[in-house]
């Protein structure tokens, strides 16, 4: 059970004078407070702020820090007969999101509560706003091909990047996430936010209502392994400021590194033609999008990155994980792993590629009335 008396790490003796003198943003002040070291509950915190005469802006929310036990429970291996998820996806960016959405909506174990469209962009086009709109339409298309239109709400995300951490953008997706997380009134409820694109929507929601850090677990495919030779990766780079905030705020996190973990999720034409294309309208559509993708045209195969996240959420035996201190993501795009005392996060270290695809094939055949 996650304890409701979330610990706020706050040392007034150290920061009484510093906090009012910091010539920096509200976000930085909030983060500074959250990084200090005395345990106080929310009521104690509010009382002490007044007592110490610390001047903070109106509506100044301090980022909560989960207790070690609470965090351990949030980032534990997913389990249960039903697992509640929200899927945040740049569905029209490549061709892998479509497979992940299909898997999630066909899963009998995953309870998909909402689908969020997140922004993406390419140089020269489309800009982030158009990328988000394209993603929104693609999610609706997948629902239609599955014959489940309207069964799960689809919500539009932020139409651009997170430009200002002090003034996060609000959108349908941020409001929905805040509402769903805030409505969780028991400590043992779990809500997993599975993000398979840029992290703009989720971080914006956390900045708008920091208390939801206590309620959610972020499952994110972003960045590479910590020993990979190069760090820049599409999802992490898609909104770098938002990506930094994920690690700055130590949001409860289960992370899927792209290279060299999820990069094993390769699918070729022969396998797709045998196990996916023949099975219903959705199989035909996945086959069509696969055929049209430039990498497939060049190489006859592509990586279905995003499928890994939802497959693991349904069956955690399909991957191996480890616990590590949460790093900082520096401005020069390198990991700072020096502080071993930072809160833990879970990292996926390997995947059973064949079993993941086999699980998808079985779902498609059953949906088509074959299995």
Image: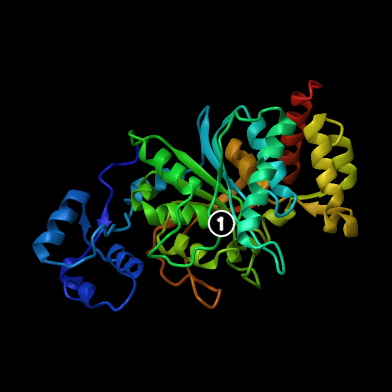
* Image spot of residue 120 (x, y percent): 64, 59
The residue closer to the viewer here, 292 or 244, is 292
Quarter location, residue 258: bottom right
**Local crowd at mark 1 within 10 Å, few (<14), some, or many (≥20)?**
many
Residue 331 appears in the figure: yes
The N terminus - image quarter: top left
Left or right: residue 52 versus residue 23 is left
Left or right: residue 254 versus residue 273 is left
* Image spot of residue 325 (x, y percent): 45, 61
Left or right: residue 6 versus residue 371 is left
Residue at image position (31%, 54%) is 64
The C terminus - image quarter: top right
Query: Looking at the image, which residue sits at the far left?
Result: 51
* Image spot of residue 33 (x, y percent): 27, 65
Q: Dot 1 lies on which element? A: loop
| Above or below for 330 versus 113 | below
Residue 41 appears in the figure: no
The residue closer to the viewer here, 191 or 323, is 191
Residue carrying label 1: 159
Quarter location, residue 279: top right
Residue at image position (44%, 67%) is 164
The residue closer to the viewer here, 331 or 138, is 138
Report the number of discs.
1
Q: What is the basis of the colouring in this image?
A: rainbow
């Amino acid at each position: 059970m996650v304890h409701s008396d979330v610990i706020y790490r706050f040392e007034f003796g150290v920061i009484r004078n510093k906090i009012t003198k910091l010539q920096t943003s509200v976000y930085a002040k909030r983060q500074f407070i959250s990084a200090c070291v005395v345990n106080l509950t929310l009521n104690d915190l509010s009382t002490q702020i007044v007592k110490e005469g610390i001047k903070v802006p109106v509506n100044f929310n301090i980022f909560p820090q989960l207790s070690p036990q609470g965090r351990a429970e949030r980032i534990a291996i997913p389990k249960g007969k039903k697992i509640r998820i929200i899927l945040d996806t740049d569905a029209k960016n490549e061709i892998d999101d479509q497979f992940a959405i299909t898997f999630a909506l066909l899963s009998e174990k995953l309870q998909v509560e909402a689908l969020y469209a997140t922004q993406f962009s390419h140089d020269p086009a489309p800009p982030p706003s158009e990328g988000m709109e394209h993603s929104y339409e693609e999610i609706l298309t997948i629902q239609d091909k599955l014959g489940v239109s309207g069964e799960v709400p689809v919500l539009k995300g932020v139409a651009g990047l997170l430009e200002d951490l002090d003034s996060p953008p609000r959108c349908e997706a941020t409001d929905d996430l805040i509402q769903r997380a805030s409505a969780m009134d028991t400590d043992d409820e779990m809500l997993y936010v599975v993000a398979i694109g840029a992290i703009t929507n989720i971080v914006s929601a956390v900045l708008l209502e920091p208390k939801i850090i206590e309620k959610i677990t972020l499952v994110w495919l972003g960045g590479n392994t910590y020993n990979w030779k190069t760090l820049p990766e599409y999802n992490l780079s898609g909104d770098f400021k938002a990506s930094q905030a994920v690690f700055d705020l130590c949001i409860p996190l289960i992370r899927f590194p792209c290279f060299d973990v999820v990069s094993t999720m390769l699918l070729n034409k022969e396998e797709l033609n045998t196990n996916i294309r023949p099975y219903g309208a959705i199989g035909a559509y996945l086959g069509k999008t696969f055929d049209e993708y430039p990498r497939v045209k060049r190489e006859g195969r592509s990586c279905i990155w995003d499928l890994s996240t939802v497959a693991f959420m349904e069956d955690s035996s399909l991957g191996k994980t480890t616990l590590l201190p949460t790093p900082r993501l520096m401005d020069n795009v390198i990991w700072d792993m020096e502080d071993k005392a930072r809160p833990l996060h879970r990292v996926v270290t390997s995947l059973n590629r064949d079993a993941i695809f086999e699980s998808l094939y079985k779902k498609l055949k059953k949906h088509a009335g074959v299995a």
